Image (cartoon, rainbow, N blue to C red):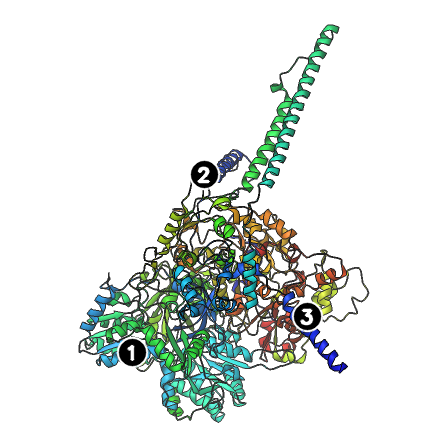
Amino acid sequence: MFRICSRSIFSFFIVLLLCNVPATAAPDGKALFMSNCASCHNPLKDATGPALQNIDKTFPDKEWGYKWVHNSSALVAAGDPTAVAIFTKFNKTQMTAFPQLSNDDIDAILKYVDEFKAPVAVAAAPAAGGEETESNGWIYTVITLALLLLVIILWRSNQGLKRIANEKEGIPNEKEIPLYRSKLVIAIVAILLFIMAGYWLTNGAVGEGRQQNYQPLQPIYYSHKVHAGINQINCLYCHAGAEKSRQAMIPSSNVCMNCHKQINSYSGGEGAEAHILKTAEGKLINGTEQIQMLYKYAGWDPAKKDYIRDAKGNIMATPIQWVKIHNLPDHVYFNHSQHVKVGQIQCQRCHGPIQEMDEVYQFAPLSMGWCINCHRQTEVKFTENNYYSVFEKYHDELKSGKRDKVTEADMGGLECQKCHY
Amino acid sequence: MSQKQYWSGLEDLNKINNPTDVAGDEFKEELPFDLSDSLFSATTPRRDFLKFMGFSTLAATLVASCEMPVRKAIPYAIKPEDITPGVPNYYASTFADGGDYCAVVVKTRDGRPIKIEGNDLSSVTKGGTSARVQASVLNLYDKARIRHPYTDGVEATFDSIDKAIKDGIGTKPGYLVTASLLSPTVKEIIAQFLARYTTVKHIVYDAVSYSGMLQANEACYGKKTLPTYHFDKAKTIVSLDADFLGTWLSPIEFAKGYSKGRKISAKELKLSKHYQVEATHTISGGAADFRATCRPSETGKVAVALYNMVANGTQPSLASKHLNDLITNAAADLKAGNGLVVCGSNDVNIQIIVNAINDKIGANGVTINWATTSNYKQGIDKDFATLVASMDAGEVGSLFLHGVNPVYDYYDNKKFTAALAKVPLTVSFADRMDETAQKCKHIVPDHNYLESWGDAEPKANYFSLMQPGIAPLFKTRSLADSLISWTGGPQSYADFWKEYWMKKTGSQEAFDKALQDGVIEPAGEMPNGGAAFAGNAADAAGKIQAEPEVKGFEVVVYQKIAIGHGGAWSNNPWLLEMPDPITRATWDNYVCMSPMRAKSKEFDAELTGFTEVDAKKRVVIVKSANGTEVKLPVIVVPGMHNDVIAIATGYGRDKKVGLAAASDDTKGGKNAYPFRTFNGTNILNHNAVTVTKTEEKYEVAVTQTHNSYEARPVIHEYTLAEFAKDSKVLLKERGEEIAEFAVEPWIEEGKESKEKIVDTATEEGYRANGTLYPNYPYEGIKWGMSIDLNSCTGCGACVVGCMAENNVSVVGKDHVLKNHEMHWIRIDRYFSGMVDNPDSIQTIFQPMLCQHCDNAPCENVCPVSATNHSSEGLNQMAYNRCIGTKYCANNCPYKVRHFNWMDWNGADCFDGNLYEDGRRDDMNDDLTRMVLNPDVTVRSRGVMEKCSFCVQRLQESKLAAKKEGHPLRDGAVKTACQQACPSDAILFGNVKDKESNIFKLRRQEQMERTFYVLEHIHTLPNVNYLARIRNTNEIDAKDEAKNEFLKYHI
């Protein structure tokens, strides 16, 4: 009897433990939402699909929700009234089926969106800080100049007094040479000018071809802030090449149309979170007009809600000629996938606060010094990636504590033919 | 020190010009500096200098203050699903040009084919390529391609031509003439076309024909086809005038097989034996162990002598003792089994004798395979001769010409041209306005093979599919589509093709796999079988013996490896600039002549200037009995038969064939085809001629003497016997050179007693102690390359493969003359032997590229550190840092650095800025530039460049390994030269990886053959070579006293 008891208690604990495993490895609702849902859904607002906050409360039951996510079109086809209602409300757009999402994943996503709160606008505190340091510098300059002036005045008056004293005492004064004819002064000024000209010329030449802060007008006013910032669309949804290719890839207009078949106007939002589109010069932009321009490029007829096709059935789309902002010289080889996929560098590291830019500008100088500096400091994923297992010496040094990290520079990341070939 | 004396050219041998003079002139032209003593009396005094400096500064400032141009980033309107910009796609396809075949993989970047690789899955070509296959991608972007159909020289539409042809075929006999066709679907469509128009017949015409072989096989075996030759299974190979490694039949396939028998190591001392009898000097002759020369008209007699020796032991009694020796030895070896005799003659009787020999030695079913026959060549000379006669008689109503150009390459092209004018309806499918197309009424241009669906059956039951890598660039239409529209078929060729192969493969899945693999082959090893010989050897031998002896000069019309029969290749700048393996000449054809003949009394002992340094060559007039006469310069080629001259085909083209091909009196060579003769059955490639001297001279751009090692030996070669006796012979030689530096210099003790055989410890010791510099510890990856001199045939596939991969520029003839050629890898050719005795000449090839020295002389002298060393052992070159002092090139002992004297690729961005050469200018065209590899910088004027070990491929493969999270796998990365090589001579890999093939080769398998060029100067190259082992009894240093012959080799 005792044995049976102890066994059952033991198995009970085992079961408990097992049940706990999924609880400890709970799916990350935010990550799942960002990678699967965010391109069509916003937690708070209707987009391509409905706003997701508290949407689970509108489901007939929980099981229905799972079925919908796994294969919504089956539900619609089966004539489920709720499903058909949503389908019709959102312009008969089929939701992508997600059979790979488990019920727990879906629960996690729903939990995340239910708890989601609109992000509070970040105060411009750091900018103010920056200003402060700048004004400090200005004051120091003024003080230094004033002091210098004082020194000169004092020196001059001292000289004048000396001459008067000399005159009084009858000691002959040296003939005063005006400053502009003093050889010493001319020499010093010439040397100074030469150094300054050299400095200016060198800096100018070094900066040749660099375009930091370059912010051109684009054929369509496309706001990264609205897409990546407010609507939280994953960068890789549009720039799918970043993990695969040398080029991050500017999306073709059919990728835009995945969402914009539904979203045909820009309201700008309301109240505190309202965002009005403006160019850098302050000109107001009508977002809806911009979407209409996209339709022209994409060959989309918003009235018929269908693509305009030629006789052969090809969509009459024309590519959008964006102005290229980030220009590297032809002799530089840069590979996005190396940095994004292998190095796991965030886009913002080089592209700046892209999620806050309405119009994109070049954030980084993209100079060789800037690249090299990062290669010097950045640690490679040395122990995580088995590729590096052949570097036995570094592994030994890490183990023995002789070295605390392996940087890109240690891997030869400063060598010419890593980027120039 | 090697025991043989090698010479790169006659001036090297004769020291007419001291080779150091050549070395001193690495940069030939005078520098634009005035080096007079007085500064002020100089032509460019100080004031001018200041003026220029002021102007340049101002100009630079002005340019710098210009605004940056606005660049556009234009995405796809609708992105195709399978394209990711920046990531290449690979499509398995098929290269077929006439009967030349290669299974290929086409690399496309953003929708443009940019590189051709061999397809490893094919059991025919096994991943090998040739120079022409590598260069074929440039033909796609050829500016001279026809861009729309023509009627009477005016642009027309397909519809109008279709109508004209359907109405015009009529009831008079018509002929469809094609080159050898490998495509089963096109053959079927032709059959449908012939069924619809019953008066039309199909004839195959090959510019370089194998009609003699086909007819001999019909006579001997009842099969008008070609067998498969298994060079890999052959222990003894006898080649009678067949350049099977260069141009004969299917050189890629043969080089693959041949090189298998040429792999040798100290542990496995097995080597095939190769006898070569030839009139000229080919690369097969260079590879041979035992080589003899004969007149081309003598080939038959040599074959008969060999037959008699094999069949009944009759000793040969030819005039040449060397030839008799060769026949006696070869016959003995052939009888020992696994023999193979091949012959390049197009005479049916000679081929019958060759068949008889192969039958007697039991080659059928062993090295000659009749169970799997080859379809490479199908043309019968007599058929075409008959056609020309009936055209001339006005009996032909229509003529359709595909892939053939008889106006240029028929032996009696004048007769053909006249006969063509008598045919009312003539249609050409040419891709350019070639000599024949110009004379045709309609031109319906065909696609390039990279734009086209298709297939090939190179061997019975071995299929290969062709798929397009790009949509057609111009208004062109495939031959099959044209025939379908004239037949009135219901579907396009693409649909027909798909249906055909769907049916053949059985399911969508199998079809997809076949398309992805590119080949459809029976499982398992290739079926092999013999055939019963039923030929009349005695009759053929009688006919051969009855032929009259030829006196005086004979001309051989041969194909160059690069240009081949002509066609589109004549206009391919990559191929034109590729140095010929033997003559090392570029851009021209010429008269090849033996040195003894060139200096003989009949030409006043002065025909050539006798030196390869002087580019000006004497022009001679060559005249044949049938009235053909050409004026061409003479190139002296050691190893040519003294009574033979040779002229290459593919030159002397019309100006409409293309800018690079165009010829006149000042450029582009002459047409050699009319020298050929027709004996009533076959077209023969030789003829009796007279040669007369003129006073004219003509410059030929020869590259061999552009680089000099200052007479330091760079090659190691041994005979098999020597190597078998003491496999450590090379290790000892190396030991004598470096062992004493392997210990620290102040340690006297042990230096003397140390046995001077190089081992791993000596190598390491030499690395550390042979220099004052500290020893750099390499971590992780270190790249290394090995080149096997036994396998290298000198074919040049690597040279062109490298040009395609690395955007290596074409500089044009004028600049090759000034040593400005840019090839990152060159194949040096060295002769040894007696100049006057062509039978004694032995030839060896050595590919030379940047050795990526760990102690590189170039790196130390760069004032701006533009060239420096990487932690992976690469000698890096940062182009944009280079200021063009050229010190590095001067200091490089291997002479592998090349300076950009001009902006070879982008000079047309300013008006009037283009360097115009007349022949290479199409390289500066937007169409041609589509071939550039976007992963490699296009070098600009004023910078140095050299081999990078294909660093872009290394980086790509490392990135792929990092993404997948595993260490780099051995063999995951191949350099372009390695991939192009048809004989697997090049091996590349990470020498730090103890499991890698390159590590094992250097340290274990081939330690005894490994050497480094100029090792004793402590450059520490990362490229090693494997010594050549020749399977010959001659040139054995140990037998020096015994053989008079040897004196000349030592």
Q: Nearer the viewer, mark 2 or mark 3?
A: 2
Left/right placement of residue B93 relative to residue B424 reads right
State the residue in front, A149 or B615.
A149
State the residue in front, A21 or B418.
A21
User: What mark, if any, has residue B190 been given in the picture?
Assistant: 1
A365 versus B126 height, above or below: above
B40 versus B238 height, above or below: above
Give the labeled residue for mark 2.
Answer: A281
Give the CA distance from mark 2 to mark 3: 78 Å
Give the CA distance from mark 2 to mark 1: 69 Å
Q: Nearer the viewer, mark 2 or mark 1?
A: 2
Question: Residue type at mark 3?
Answer: Glu
The chain under label 1 reads: B
Can residue B12 be seen by looking at this rendering?
yes
Left/right placement of residue B759 relative to residue A106 reads right
A38 versus B348 height, above or below: above
